[in-house]
């Protein structure tokens, strides 16, 4: 229930402050998939969730669950991942949710970065989840979200946001996990 209330409120905010122009929506699979996106704004999880039109799960840094809003985070489908470590529990949870047919939003670079700031080193956990689940990894490129909610800002600024959705790929364990993770990030930025 919390998820759909949040979805409705975010849809209204999007219409008012960040109208979405989406290209490639037909590339979203109907079943489970990993939605791998660049990360330039705190709005990115909301934006990616809105373009799917489905209930979506999210990997989120564990510190977000310690700020008195854990019940909201869980209510909107997020679950914590410990950054900087091999968090087997979050990988198991990701595989469980994908096994239920849910899309899972991930940010392979792990943290927000400046637009045109170069790519960050991707976390190999995304590759492990992709290989073990056998689900397609759908690259998504978000452009303009950092102008709606600039770093350090508490207020939204009206600006269009462009979302480009690429074709999904299924990855096999034919190369090192680091190489798969890099390929996923390259696929995201090739959409720019």
Image: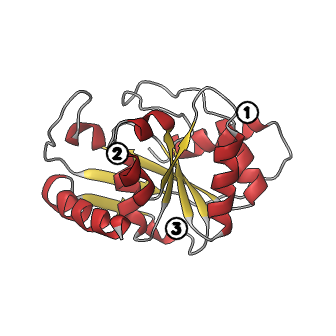
The picture quadrant where one finds residue 150 is top left
Pointer 2 local density, CA inside 10 Å: few below 14, some 14–19, many at least 20 = few
Looking at the image, do the residues carrying marks 2 and 1 touch, with CB atoms under 8 Å apart?
Answer: no
N-terminal label among 2 and 1: 2
Pointer 3 local density, CA inside 10 Å: few below 14, some 14–19, many at least 20 = many
Pointer 1 local density, CA inside 10 Å: few below 14, some 14–19, many at least 20 = some
- Real-space CA distance between mark 3 and mark 1, rounded to the nearest whole angstrom: 25 Å
Residue at 40 percent of width and 46 percent of height: 70
- Asked if residue 49 can be seen in this view, the reply is yes
Judging by the rendered image, the residue that carries numbered circle 1 is 178
Residue 97, placed above or below residue 90 = below
**Quadrant showing the C terminus:** top left
Q: Nearer the viewer, residue 120 or 188?
A: 120
Judging by the rendered image, the residue that carries numbered circle 2 is 69
**Quadrant showing the N terminus:** bottom left
SS class of the residue under badge 1? helix
The image shows residue 85 at horizontal and vertical percentages of 66, 28
Nearer mark to the viewer, of 2 and 3: 2
Q: Residue furthest bottom?
A: 30
Residue 28 is labelled as 3
Residue at 23 percent of width and 39 percent of height: 149
- Real-space CA distance between mark 2 and mark 1, rounded to the nearest whole angstrom: 33 Å
Looking at the image, do the residues carrying marks 3 and 1 touch, with CB atoms under 8 Å apart?
Answer: no
């Amino acid at each position: 229930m919390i998820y759909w209330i949040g979805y409705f409120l975010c849809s209204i905010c999007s219409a008012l402050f960040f109208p979405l122009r989406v290209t490639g929506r037909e590339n979203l699979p109907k079943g489970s998939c990993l939605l791998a996106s660049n990360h330039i704004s705190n709005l990115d999880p909301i934006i990616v969730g809105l373009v799917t039109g489905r209930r979506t799960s999210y990997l989120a840094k564990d510190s977000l669950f310690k700020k008195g809003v854990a019940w909201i985070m869980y209510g909107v489908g997020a679950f914590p991942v410990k950054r900087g470590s091999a968090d087997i529990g979050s990988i198991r949870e990701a595989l469980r949710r994908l096994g239920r047919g849910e899309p899972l939003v991930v940010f392979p670079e792990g943290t927000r970065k400046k637009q045109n700031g170069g790519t960050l080193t991707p976390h190999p956990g995304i590759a492990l989840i992709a290989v073990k689940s056998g689900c397609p990894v759908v690259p998504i490129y978000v452009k303009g979200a950092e102008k709606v909610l600039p770093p350090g800002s508490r207020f939204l600024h009206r600006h269009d946001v462009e979302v480009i959705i690429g074709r999904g790929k299924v990855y096999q364990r034919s190369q090192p996990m680091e190489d798969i993770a890099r390929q996923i990030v390259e696929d995201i930025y090739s959409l720019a």
